[in-house]
Amino acid sequence: MIIIQPTYQVLFFGPEPQNPVAPISTSVTPSKGFRGQQISVVVTGNFFVLSSTTFSFGAGITVSSLVINNQTTATMLLTIDPAAVLGFHDLTTTGTPGSTVLSNAFQVLSMASGMTYPPRVDELWSPAVRKWMKDSRKHGVAINIPGRKRDK
C-alpha cells in the first residue's frame, strides 16, 4: 500500500520576517582595491536579510550599490576615495538584531605613479625582481611578457 501525502509551502504575505540572529560576514572577494577605484565585490556569510542588512568598510570606502543575492551572499560596488587610508579595513555587517565585524576584511592599496589600471603583473613586482629580470636579459636570457615594454 502506498500512501501519498501532499507537501505544503508556507507563504508570507506582508512584511518580510525578521531574522533573530545578527548577520555575519566571513569573506570578501576580491579583498584588495586601489585608491580612486570602483570595484565590485562579493561578501559571503550568513543571515543576510534583504530589507535590513547593511555593510560598511569605514571611512574612505563607500558602498555605492548593494544586492543581497540570498541569505549567504551579497554583491556590492565599492567606491574607494583617492584619499582613503591605506591598509586593512574592517567590514561591519549590520542587521535588525545587531552587528558583527570582520577584521582586516579589505585592503586599500596605493597605485604607484606611472602604473596602469588595472596594473600589469610586472608593475606589481618588487624592485629586486625587476633588477633580476633586467640583469637576466643582459646575460642572454630571453624573458617575454606580453604587453610589457622592454627596459632600455
Image (cartoon, rainbow, N blue to C red):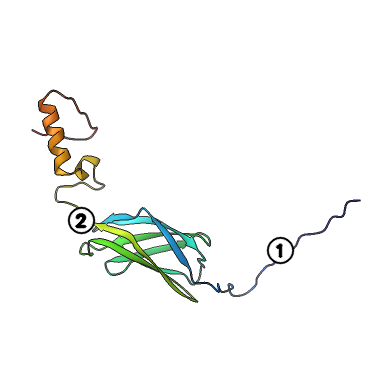
Residue 111 visible, this orientation: yes
Horizontal relation, residue 143 to residue 69: left or right: left
Q: Estimate how packed mark 2 is, as few (under 14), some (14 to 19) or many (20 or more) residues with alpha carbons within 10 Å.
A: some
Q: Secondary structure at mark 2?
A: loop
* Residue 75 relative to residue 115: left or right: right
Q: CA distance from mark 2 to mark 1?
A: 52 Å
Task: Inspect this view and state whether residue 150 appears.
Answer: no
Which comes sooner in the sequence, label 2 or label 1? Answer: 1
Considering the numbered disc 1 on the image, is that residue within a helix, a strand or a loop? loop
The residue lying furthest to the bottom in this view is 97
Q: Amino acid at mark 1?
A: Gln
Query: Which mark, by number, is residue 110?
Result: 2
Residue 39 is situated, as x and y percent measured from the top left of the image, at 33, 55
Residue 26: image quadrant is: bottom left
Give the residue drawn at x 68%, y 67%. Answer: 11
Q: Residue at x 46, y 66 (%)?
A: 24
Residue at 52% over, 66% down = 47
| Residue that label 1 marks | 9
